[in-house]
Image: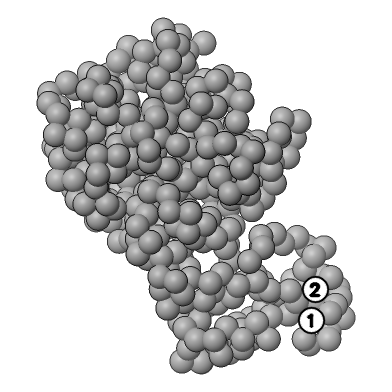
């Protein structure tokens, strides 16, 4: 299936040749919406496709689930009529999700030592013991990765091999050597937390020898279409990568994303997701709130719950998320968000997988060895992720590097 890129012009053009034969116009356009229809049979998929008022696409998830998703443009009446079919499990809007991050506070210049979060989760202890995540592939489902950043280029899967990276929304602007390049900075920041190289300067990631794959689903402004995210999860699973990180979400439920999470797990991929930045109880976003995803909340350098972090019973584990320094389009920058917490856990998962564990055992080891911070379970889940403990190393080091320093 090709990319599901929709625009108002494409939609109006599709309506002109759609099954209803209705005329093109603003009034018609505003009566239609983009939906994802989850079907459990070939007949259901055909029925949904026939009712799409224009072009449609399919996401075949039957290799690991019972579902085929039909993505198209439907009137409200037609989308509702599909729900009367026994072989239609759900009809949901193909809504846009957003990143869970914001610019961090002003930080003093650092000397290239590990960012505080990398030290706090004892990734530095693992590095000293030779554990680097080597051999594990991590899909970064985000806004792309800057292939020229000196801390990332060595761990980025070969950019000239088409299968290594994919884009469902093309990079725009003046610095886009590839369609999947980063035009907003968020994906590069996330990638740096996961697997920035361990050099003499700059930053280092949790798993500094893991292999990064850019799966660009978000525009530079941060909008990320549900159908694109589903396709990206399927793509990573079909490639046989070990971990995917999703530093994005929405307050609205999404059975399509839950189905994609099921597909990933059945294929042997562990999906890690940011809990959200709503800063209140019972506010964990989707897809993190689904059991299929490892939901990550955010902590501060003082081991408290970050004010912005979503909380709730769905939280599985916590990780540093406030004033986190990482790679950026212009060098390095701090950011706040559960977007920054999630890649700490994705990097930890890569470390455990490199030690020989599958996705289920990796999840169990991360949760069983997490450090209890004394916070409510709805804030921290099992506790703060601890890379050294998950690998069986001494985890008594609770350092925070040089604090909030960030390379100039």
Residue 187 vertical placement versus 49 (above, below): above
Taking the image as shown, residue 384 lies to the left or right of residue 289, namely left
Badge 2 crowding class, 10 Å Cα cut-off, few under 14, some 14 to 19, many 20 or more, is some
Residue at the spot x=54%, y=86% of the render?
A: 42
Q: Residue at x 46, y 74 (%)?
A: 62
- Element under label 1? loop
Quadrant in which residue 319 is drawn: top left
Q: Look at the numbered disc 2 and give the secondary structure of its residue.
A: helix
Verify CB contact (< 8 Å) between mark 2 and mark 1: yes
Viewer-proximal residue among 31 and 35? 35
Which of the labelled discs sits on residue 18, or is there none?
1
**Left or right of 21: which side holds 190?**
left
Is 256 left, or right, of 366 in this rendering? Answer: right
**Residue 321, picture quadrant:** top left
The residue closer to the viewer here, 171 or 27, is: 171
Identify residue for label 2.
14
């Amino acid at each position: 299936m090709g990319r599901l890129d929709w625009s108002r012009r494409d939609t109006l053009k599709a309506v002109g040749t759609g099954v209803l034969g209705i005329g093109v116009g603003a009034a018609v356009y505003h009566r239609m919406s983009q939906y994802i229809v989850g079907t459990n049979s070939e007949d259901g998929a055909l029925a949904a496709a026939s009712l799409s008022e224009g072009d449609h696409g399919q996401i075949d998830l039957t290799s690991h689930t019972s579902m085929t998703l039909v993505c198209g443009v439907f009137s409200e009446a037609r989308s509702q009529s599909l729900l009367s079919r026994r072989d239609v499990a759900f009809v949901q809007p193909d809504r846009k999700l957003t990143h869970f991050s914001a610019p961090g506070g002003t930080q003093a210049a650092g000397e290239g030592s590990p960012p505080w979060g990398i030290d706090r989760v004892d990734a530095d202890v693992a590095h000293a013991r030779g554990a680097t995540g080597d051999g594990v592939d991590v899909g970064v489902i985000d806004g792309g990765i800057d292939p020229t950043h000196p801390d990332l280029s060595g761990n980025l899967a070969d950019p000239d091999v088409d299968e290594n990276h994919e884009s469902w929304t093309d990079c725009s602007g003046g610095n886009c050597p590839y369609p999947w390049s980063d035009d907003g900075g968020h994906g590069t920041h996330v990638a740096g937390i996961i697997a920035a190289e361990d050099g003499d300067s700059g930053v280092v990631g949790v798993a500094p020898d893991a292999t990064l794959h850019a799966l660009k689903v978000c525009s530079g402004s941060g909008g990320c279409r549900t159908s694109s995210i589903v396709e990206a999860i399927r793509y990573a699973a079909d490639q046989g990568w070990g971990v995917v990180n999703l530093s994005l979400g929405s307050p609205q439920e999404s059975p399509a994303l839950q189905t994609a999470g099921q597909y990933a797990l059945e294929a042997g991929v562990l999906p890690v997701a940011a809990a959200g930045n709503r800063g209140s109880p019972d506010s964990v976003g989707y897809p993190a709130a689904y059991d299929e995803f490892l939901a990550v909340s955010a902590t501060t350098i003082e081991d408290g719950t970050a004010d912005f972090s979503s909380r709730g019973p769905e939280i599985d584990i916590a990780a540093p998320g406030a004033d986190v320094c990482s790679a950026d389009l212009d060098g390095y920058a701090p950011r706040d968000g559960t977007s920054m917490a999630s890649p700490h856990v994705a990097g930890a998962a890569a470390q455990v997988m490199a030690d020989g564990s599958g996705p289920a055992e990796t999840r169990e080891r991360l949760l069983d060895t997490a450090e209890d911070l004394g916070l409510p379970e709805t804030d921290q889940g099992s506790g703060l992720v601890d890379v050294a403990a998950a690998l069986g190393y001494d985890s008594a080091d609770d350092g925070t590097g040089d604090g909030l320093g960030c390379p100039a």
